[in-house]
């Protein structure tokens, strides 16, 4: 879920290969594909075009490969966490975008790796979640990276992207208004040039926030 101690370098040099993780301590509309597979934009017949992305709604595919372990959390992240709140991008259960998998344990903890524009992979570390983190918060947080959000592990529980920073007592699984607004701003512009390049972000934990 969190960005670990590389957060500053990610912000200052977004083209670098870096990591986004929840660290281990703790439309009539037609669909027109953008140059990146797995991200679609809905275009209307009356004046909307692929060059007018601000007037379109992006679609990001989320593929559940958790073997049923976190299938409910993946589904809820789509239908209850993100889709009701953001307007310029919508998530769907399909392939070609962000793949969510679960592993027994990972040296980096739960994390996202991808382009932060609807493509990449999310790995959920079961041993980390079992420390007491809310599974839905972990999954929704990592998907948030795929929508363009960085970690803010020193933030309060009310911020989804604070990851595990507030500790296991934090049971909020929803983005706040500022995070929703940021996603809408990201997906209102041209997706061709807006991405930071390939990154990896780890799920921040309370230890990392110190």
Image (spheres, grey):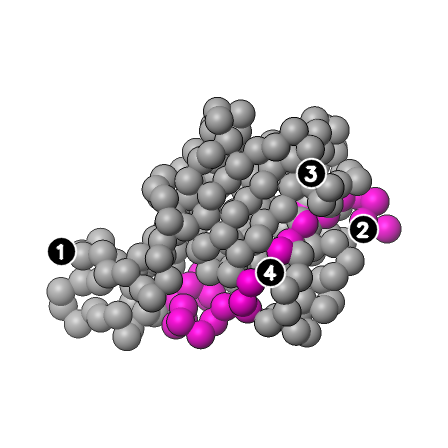
**CA gap, disc 4 to disc 3?**
17 Å
How far is the residue under mark 3 from the one under mark 2?
20 Å
Q: Tag 3, which secondary structure?
A: loop
Residue wearing tag 4: 199
User: Where residue 178 appears, x then y in whole percent?
Assistant: 57, 58
Q: Is residue 173 shown above or below 153?
A: above
Instruction: Give coordinates of residue 82: x percent, y percent.
Output: 46, 46
Asked if labels 4 and 2 touch by Cβ distance under 8 angstroms, the answer is no
Foreground: disc 2 or disc 4: 4
Q: Could you say whether the residue bearing mark 4 is in a helix, strand or loop?
A: strand
**x%, y% of residue 51?**
28, 75
The tag earlier along the polypeptide, 1 or 3, is: 1
Q: Judge whether residue 176 can be spotted in this image.
A: no
In magenta segment, residue 199:
yes
Chain part drawn in magenta: 183-210
- Looking at the image, residue 37 sits to the left or right of residue 85; the answer is left
Chain-order first, disc 2 or disc 1: 1
Graded by Cα atoms within 10 Å as few (under 14), some (14 to 19) or many (20 or more), the crowding at tag 3 reads some
Mark on residue 209?
A: 2
Which class describes the residues within 10 Å of circle 2: few (<14), some (14-19), or many (20+)? Answer: some
On the image, the x and y values in percent for residue 85 come to 44, 48
Q: Which mark is residue 106?
A: 3
Q: Which corner quadrant of the image does residue 19 belong to?
A: bottom right
Mark-to-mark CA distance, 2 and 1: 48 Å
Element at label 2: loop
Above or below residue 97? Residue 43 is below
Residue placed under numbered mark 1 in the picture? 28
């Amino acid at each position: 879920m969190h960005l670990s101690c590389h957060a500053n370098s990610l912000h200052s040099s977004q083209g670098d290969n870096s990591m986004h993780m929840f660290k281990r301590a703790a439309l009539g509309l037609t669909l027109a594909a953008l140059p990146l597979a797995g991200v679609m934009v809905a275009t209307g017949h009356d004046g909307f075009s692929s060059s007018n992305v601000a007037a379109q709604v992006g679609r990001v595919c989320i593929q559940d490969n958790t073997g049923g372990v976190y299938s409910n959390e993946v589904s809820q992240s789509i239908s209850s966490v993100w889709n009701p709140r953001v307007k310029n991008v919508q998530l769907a259960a399909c392939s070609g975008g962000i793949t969510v998998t679960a592993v027994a344990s990972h040296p980096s903890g739960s994390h996202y790796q991808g382009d932060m524009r609807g493509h990449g992979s999310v790995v959920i570390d079961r041993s980390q979640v079992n420390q007491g983190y809310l599974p839905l918060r972990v999954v929704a947080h990592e998907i948030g990276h795929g929508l363009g959000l960085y970690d803010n592990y020193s933030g309060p529980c009310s911020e989804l992207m604070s990851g595990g920073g507030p500790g296991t007592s934090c049971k909020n699984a929803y983005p706040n208004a500022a995070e929703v607004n940021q996603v809408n701003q990201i997906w209102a512009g041209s997706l061709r040039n807006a991405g930071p390049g390939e990154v990896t972000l780890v799920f921040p934990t309370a230890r990392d926030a110190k």
